[in-house]
Image (cartoon, grey):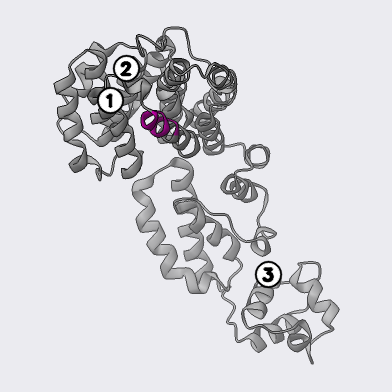
Amino acid sequence: MIAGVGALVRRERLARDWSLKGLAHGICAVSYLSKIERGEADPSPEVTGALLERLGIAWHDDEAFLARARDVLDRGYDALLSIDEAAFPALTAELADLAADLATSPLVAEATLLEGLLAKPARPVEPELEVLLDGRLLGLQRLAQGRFDDALRLNPCAYAYLQAGAAAYESGEKNYVPAIDLLRQAYELAAREGRARVMLSSKVCLGNCYCNQLDFENMEVEYRVASRLARTLGEKDMLRTISYNTASAHAECGHFERAYAFFSTLDDPSALDLHKLAVCCEGLGRRDEALAALDRVPEARREPRTEVGDDLAGELCDLVRFRLEHPDYLRRPEYGKALLAVFARCRAELPIGFAAFHLPWVLEWHTANRQYRAAFELERDFPLKLPAVVEYDGVSGVQ
């Protein structure tokens, strides 16, 4: 049987809204065609050819085409596993040029999977093609499905460990312990495999874990290595991310002068940069400077480097403005409503560290309004356990 022809026959038959009986008529038994489509039968070349001819399909399996397609796929998967994003657009274009012929070739499942993995967000292949994937490719399919344990079992490569670790980082599960373990393995495997950008991403994500734990010693160790790799690879955006995360952690701990030294000197600040600058100024008692920073947000909100959407970035900044303009904000229900809504969005839409940054203000609100049970349950159930350096007080405010 031609590899993958059963899945192709089923897909094309359903696309034409044909019955099994209609396609099988004069070629083979209906039950036999059903087995062919499920990959449970090995039909003769004559039966295979007759089915494809009736469907009007030209099967592409000549050596020249397969060699060309195989070269594109091999380069594509290597770029994917190396996170060589600069190569993605050209590879996507090459796949598009071959798409029609690949769809009726033995490489259809492998090509469709690669196309989905290069997309953002990644998308898995449909079930009828999944059955054609072998172990390592099936592991990448499981990655796209978010089934990380299965992915690591089937394809324990550096890229798979990085993706699993990044997902654990975003959830903050068990205070980042699983994420840290997965990311360390990703870094070690990437070093063995020679995938420098996976090494870089692993170290940045490790630094992020410690950053959100407010573990400055380990954060600086991981970010120091990441910075060396980023400079070597010319990854300026990564260097900016590292600096932003470091300064944000200091702001979260109340080290406002140190954080201010970074955020106040940026040439092209994003909405998030201006939000953090305003928080630092708020903490330092520089009300006018904080408001001036917030006044610059509308023109910066569409800045493409920000991780937060325009509307959410604006809502975060609006909370700071409300506190600055209303010293009695803890007695204003509209502030509490807005704060809790933004906090819920951060938890639902972003890595948990974003919500952790705003946790002290939420606890402050609950405490000031005698919502002690809500404060207790939030602190008890929150995925991250932050050190006592991050304090809140219903009278004095966030310290």
For label 1, the SS is: helix
Crowdedness near tag 2: few (<14), some (14–19) or many (≥20) residues, C-alpha within 10 Å: many
| Left/right of residue 370 with respect to residue 286 in the rendered view | right
Q: Which residue is mark 1?
A: 276
Ranked by sequence position, the earlier of labels 2 and 1 is 2
- Foreground: disc 1 or disc 3: 1
* Residue 10, position as x, y percentages in the image: 69, 74
Q: Amino acid at mark 3?
A: Ala
State the residue position of label 3. 7
Residue 294 at x, y percent in the picture? 20, 31
Q: Is residue 307 magenta?
A: no
Residue 46 circle label: none
Mark 2 and mark 1 residues within 8 Å of each other at the beta carbon: yes
- Determine the CA span between mark 1 and mark 3: 53 Å
Q: Quadrant of residue 255?
A: top left
- In the rendering, which numbered label is found on residue 251? 2
Marks 2/1: CA–CA distance: 8 Å
Magenta stretch encompasses residue 339: yes
**Mark 1 or 3 closer to N-term?**
3
